[in-house]
Amino acid sequence: MSVVRPDATSGLSDWLQYLESLHAKAIDLGLDRVKEVAQRLDLQLDAVKFVVGGTNGKGSTCAMLEAILLAAGYKVGLYTSPHLIDFNERARVNGEIATDAALVEQFEAVEAARGDTSLTYFEFTTLAILRLFSQSRLDAVVLEVGLGGRLDAVNIVDADCAIVTSVDIDHTDWLGDTREKIGFEKAHIYRAGRPAICSDPVPPQSLLDHIAEIGADAWLFGRDFNYSGDRQQWAYGGRSVRRPSLAYPALRGANQLLNASAALAALESVRDRLPVPQQAVRLGLLQASLPGRFQILPGQPAVILDVAHNPHAAAVLAQNLDNMGFHPYTHAVFGMLNDKDLAGVVAKFGTRVDHWYCAGLPGPRGNSGEGLAEQVQAQLPQVAAGAEGPSVAAFADPAAAYAAAREKAGENDRIVVFGSFLTVAAVLQALGRKA
C-alpha cells in the first residue's frame, strides 16, 4: 500500500505514517545518507552538546541532565527515543514537549532537503528534531543515542561531552553478541580531546582502547568520579568538584545514583561553559521525571511500570522489587518482543513472580500471548513435587492482561508491568494516562 506524500494540510499523524513507508528497512545503520541531508539543511548546533549512549540508564541520565540544567536557568533541548504514548515526547524545548505544528514545520524542511536520498523513520525524525533545536537558541542540548553509537544517526553530532552509561547484551543482531563488541560500537560517540564519561563500573576493554586511540579525555566511574551515601542523603565526588548533602533523585531505583553521578561528571567536565550551582543540582534531581522507569502509580494494589526488556535491566528491576518491602503476591503483566532475550529476562525473576499474565504485542517483532506464555513456562524454575509453582496465563494484549491482574490482585499485592515500551504504553493508555 502506497502512502500519500504529505501536503500543506497534513497533520503530524499523516507525516509519521508517511515516514514509516519511506525506507525499505526500519533500521539501516550508517551515517552517509543522514550526513548528506544534514549538510543540505546546514544544521548548526551552537549549544553545548551532550550525547548519551548505553544499554540501560540512558533515559534517566538524560532526564537528570535536562532537569539540572533547567534548574540552573539554561535553555535546554532534550531528544530521547522511543516514545511511550505520543511521538512529541521525543523532543522537549525548555522542558516543554514539542507541538505538532513545530514538528510538522521541521518535517517539511527535511523532506524538501532530502531530494532522492532515502531516510529511515529514525534518521528523518532525528534530523527534524536537531533542526528544531538549532532554531531554538539553546544553551545546551541533550541527545540520547537510539541504537549503539557508531552508526546511529545521533552520531552525526560532535559531542562536547559524551556519556556511555552501561554496556550489556541487547540488540545483538545489530551490535554484536559480546560486551566487547557492543562496547566498541558505543564508544564511537566519544570525540578526540573531549570528555568521555563512562559510568559502567566494569567498562569493556574495547571501549577503553577506543578512548585511548582517539585521545579522548576519559572520565571513569570509580577513578574520576564516584558517589557515597547513607539513608538520608548522598554525595558526589569528581576530579575537582564535590557535591555533598544531596537528596536522593526523584527517579526511583537501585541504579539511579550511578546515573546521577554520570550526569554530574558530565556537568563537571564542561563547568567552564555551563557552571551549575549546588542548589540547581538539588532541585534538578528532585524534579527529574521519566515515565516507565520503575514508575510506581499511586493507590492499591501497588502498580509498578518498567520498560525493562533485557537481562541487565531485568536484574535491576528485580533488585528494586526486592527493596520494596513485603507484598503477599506479585502479579507480572509481561509483554516482550520476539527478538529479545526472553530466557535471560525471566531468569532474573526466579520465584519473585506468583502469577504471569503474558500479553501479545503487535507488529512483525511481536508475539502472541499464547506463544509468550509457552516460552515463559519453559523458563520457570522447577518446583518440588506437590508444591505449587507460579501460574502462567495468556492474553491478546497488555490491556487485557492488566485487567485480569487487577481483578485477581488483592489490595496489598503488587502488579509489575514490564518487558517492552509497547507493554507499558498500552497499560498507560488503558488507564487513560499521558506519559
Image (cartoon, rainbow, N blue to C red):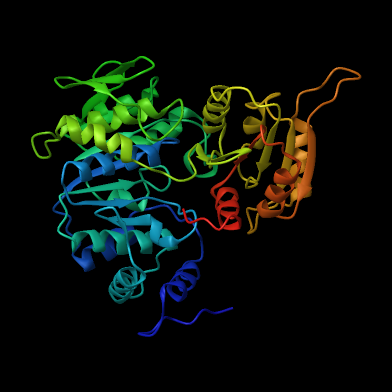
| Residue 30 at x, y percent in the picture | 38, 53
Residue at 43% in and 30% down: 167
Left or right: where 373 falls relative to 286: right
In which quarter of the view is residue 218 placed?
top left
Looking at the image, the residue that sits furthest to the right is 386
Left or right: where 377 falls relative to 106: right
| Residue 329 at x, y percent in the picture | 71, 29
| Residue 314 at x, y percent in the picture | 56, 31
Left or right: where 369 falls relative to 349: right
Residue at 24% in and 25% down: 219
Quadrant (top left/top right/bottom left/bottom right) for the N terminus:
bottom right
| Residue 131 at x, y percent in the picture | 24, 63
Q: Is residue 317 above or below residue 45?
A: above
**Viewer-nearest residue: 369 or 162:** 369
Q: Is residue 109 above or below residue 82?
A: below
Left or right: where 56 falls relative to 422: left
Residue at 70% in and 26% down: 328
Residue at 45% in and 56% down: 28
Q: Is residue 118 above or below residue 226?
A: below
Looking at the image, the residue that sits furthest to the left is 272
Is residue 349 shown to the viewer in this render?
yes
Q: Is residue 33 above or below residue 329?
A: below
